[in-house]
């Protein structure tokens, strides 16, 4: 058993109670520490900028007033408290997103006001009124409160305690219009939990961000005035706003300033370090992450074993290898043999048996990998005789090793975004001291993302024999080759495809986090099963 999202006896934030009135699962997600970077959050922060700054207060209008009701066990903050004649107070709550674009007071707003007013009264203040100010409409709506409103608020506090102190996550709403306006829909994924086509996709605007690859040997990255700067040989070679950074991948001999590392972690952005040859050597993540209780459950499940998850990781990988070979190779019988191995996956009775099937399928796929290379590439001497990890024995293996590291860096970021531990897996073993869960999730993306990138780079002429060096039988990528592969990989992961389970279009990079959240759903009990991505 694991602990709850909020410890019993801890005071509840009033905002969390309001979220429960809106949606119990939203309250659970908030209590678990999930944060989103959506336009709703950005808009709300912008509209609250003045009210969150106590320095903008006036004697008759106090800003950002902290309140607490010790008897009820809640704490919160009033946006504005107006002081009238005789010291009587009026509480004004600022809201930026009215329901249905109308300045209408919702149940959650009414509960929030009732708790704020109750907290002020418990401190001995006289509250004469309360209102909601809708910033988008610049309309102030008075909200009269009766005894039944305060009773409903007390009941909501009790319900919030029961929800966030539970060991089980609440089930998501089903076909509910509230999901369309929820800023946490992208982490809740309410429509996807059923594991079938999504009829009405929840669309949450993605911020204009990107993963930054730092690959210029000898360069140094730092931050100044809200920008990420890269200098090499005394010259500035790159500059972009930190608001556009989704994560950073460092390749080889590149230095990061302490200030930049600190700023990235403050912004909850990950950093992954790779060698120049493409081996992931480590990563940095913020100290505070979401879903701590579920992370404990993950380790328990990893130790006990979850064959249902392991089967899906292997089954999806094998299916995708067969599809890749069928689409691009000249080996129909090999693709059929791989699919035959895939049909044995549901009956596998152990992770060892699954790894055996996975190894057989991989051997067939890589034995015919060169059939997927263009005649021009093969004529230039590019081919794969056998799969070799490190050291790579030919350009194809060197490119695969490098792109697999790029994929692993993305999957580590996706797993960490959910609050899961990259090391506690269900197919790969943690005893090898490798990021087992991240490697588990990589499996279904290897063929449609990484292998496709390498094939495309060779077949399109982006990678040529001159992009590689050879020393005593070991093949390495030169800097120009690394840059070409990074560019090709970024194009691929930002390409949209139709999700085979949910039916909507998404990017491959977003799909990695979606799949990680599907694993989280199985762990927290809000989802019956995990289904891997299988391309057709």
Image (cartoon, rainbow, N blue to C red):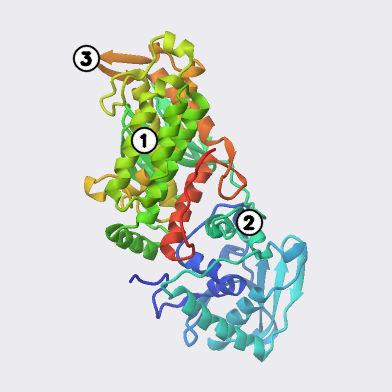
Q: Is residue 412 visible?
A: no
Query: Mark 3–mark 1 contact, CB under 8 Å?
Result: no
Name the residue rendered at 56%, 81% in the picture.
156
Q: Is residue 105 visible?
A: yes
Query: What residue occupies the far bottom of the structure in this picture?
Result: 147
- Which of the pair 307/483 is nearer the observer? 307
Sequence-earlier tag: 2 or 1: 2
In the rendered image of this protein, does residue 507 appear above or below residue 48?
above
Q: Which of label 3 and label 1 is nearer to you? A: 1
Name the residue rendered at 56%, 73% in the picture.
20
**Relative to 67, is 368 on the left or the right?**
left
Q: Residues within 10 Å of mark 1 (few under 14, many from 20)?
A: many
In the rendered image of this protein, does residue 32 appear above or below residue 207?
below
Where disc 1 sits, the SS reads helix
**Residue receiving disc 3:** 472
**In which quadrant will I find the C terminus?**
top right
In the rendered image of this protein, does residue 350 appear above or below residue 131?
above
Name the residue rendered at 27%, 47% in the picture.
352
**Residue receiving disc 1:** 361
Q: Which mark is residue 40?
A: 2
- Which of the pair 212/56 is nearer the observer? 212
Q: Which of label 3 and label 2 is nearer to you? A: 3
Name the residue rendered at 53%, 71% in the picture.
16
Q: CA distance from mark 3 to mark 1?
A: 30 Å
In the rendered image of this protein, does residue 8 appear above or below residue 25?
below
**Relative to 51, is 253 on the left or the right?**
left
Q: Position of residue 492 (x, y in %)?
A: 52, 32
Sequence-earlier tag: 3 or 1: 1
Q: CA distance from mark 3 to mark 2?
A: 57 Å
- Which of the pair 232/149 is nearer the observer? 149
**In which quadrant will I find the N terminus?**
bottom left
């Amino acid at each position: 058993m694991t602990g709850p999202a909020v410890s019993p006896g801890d005071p509840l934030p009033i905002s969390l109670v309001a979220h429960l009135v809106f949606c119990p699962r939203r309250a659970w997600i908030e209590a678990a520490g999930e944060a989103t970077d959506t336009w709703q959050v950005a808009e709300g922060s912008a509209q609250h900028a003045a009210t969150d700054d106590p320095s903008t207060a006036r004697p008759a209008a106090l800003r950002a007033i902290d309140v607490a009701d010790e008897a009820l066990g809640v704490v919160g903050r009033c946006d504005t408290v107006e002081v009238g004649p005789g010291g009587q107070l009026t509480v004004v709550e600022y809201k930026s997103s009215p329901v249905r674009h109308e300045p209408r007071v919702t149940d959650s707003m009414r509960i929030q006001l009732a708790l704020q007013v109750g907290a002020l009264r418990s401190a001995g203040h006289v509250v004469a009124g309360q209102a909601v100010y809708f910033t988008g409409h610049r309309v102030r709506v008075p909200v009269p409160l009766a005894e039944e409103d305060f009773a409903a608020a007390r009941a909501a506090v009790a319900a919030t305690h029961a929800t966030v102190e539970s060991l089980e996550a609440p089930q998501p709403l089903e076909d509910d219009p509230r999901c369309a306006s929820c800023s946490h829909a992208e982490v809740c994924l309410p429509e996807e939990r059923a594991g079938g086509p999504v009829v009405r996709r929840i669309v949450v605007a993605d911020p204009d961000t990107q993963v930054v690859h730092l690959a210029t040997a000898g360069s140094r990255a730092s931050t100044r005035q809200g920008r990420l700067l890269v200098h090499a040989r005394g010259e500035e070679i790159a500059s972009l706003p930190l608001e556009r950074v989704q994560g950073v991948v460092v390749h080889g001999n590149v230095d990061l300033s302490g200030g930049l590392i600190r700023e990235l972690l403050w912004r909850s952005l990950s950093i992954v370090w790779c060698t120049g040859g493409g081996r992931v050597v480590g990563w940095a993540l913020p100290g505070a992450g979401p879903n701590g209780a579920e992370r404990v459950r993950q380790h328990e499940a990893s130790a006990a074993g979850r064959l249902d998850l392991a089967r899906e990781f292997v089954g999806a990988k094998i299916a995708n290898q067969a599809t890749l070979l069928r689409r691009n190779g000249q080996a129909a019988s090999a693709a059929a043999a791989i699919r035959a191995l895939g049909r044995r996956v549901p009956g596998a009775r152990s992770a060892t048996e699954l790894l055996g099937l996975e190894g057989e399928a991989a051997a067939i796929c890589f034995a015919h990998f060169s059939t997927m290379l263009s005649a021009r590439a093969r004529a230039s001497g590019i081919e794969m005789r056998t799969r070799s990890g490190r050291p790579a024995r030919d350009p194809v293996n060197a490119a695969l090793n490098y792109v697999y590291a790029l994929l692993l860096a993305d999957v580590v970021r996706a797993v960490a975004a959910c609050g899961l531990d990259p090391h506690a897996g269900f197919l790969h073993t943690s005893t090898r001291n490798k990021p087992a869960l991240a490697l588990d999730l990589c499996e279904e993306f290897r063929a449609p993302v990484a292998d496709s990138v390498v094939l495309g780079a060779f077949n399109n002429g982006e990678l040529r024999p001159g992009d590689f060096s050879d020393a005593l039988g070991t093949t390495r990528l030169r800097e120009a080759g690394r840059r070409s592969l990074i560019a090709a990989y970024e194009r691929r992961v930002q390409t949209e495809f139709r999700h085979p389970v949910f039916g909507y279009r998404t990017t491959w990079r977003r799909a990695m986090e979606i799949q990680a959240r599907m694993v989280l759903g199985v762990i927290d009990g809000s989802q019956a099963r995990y289904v891997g991505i299988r391309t057709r």
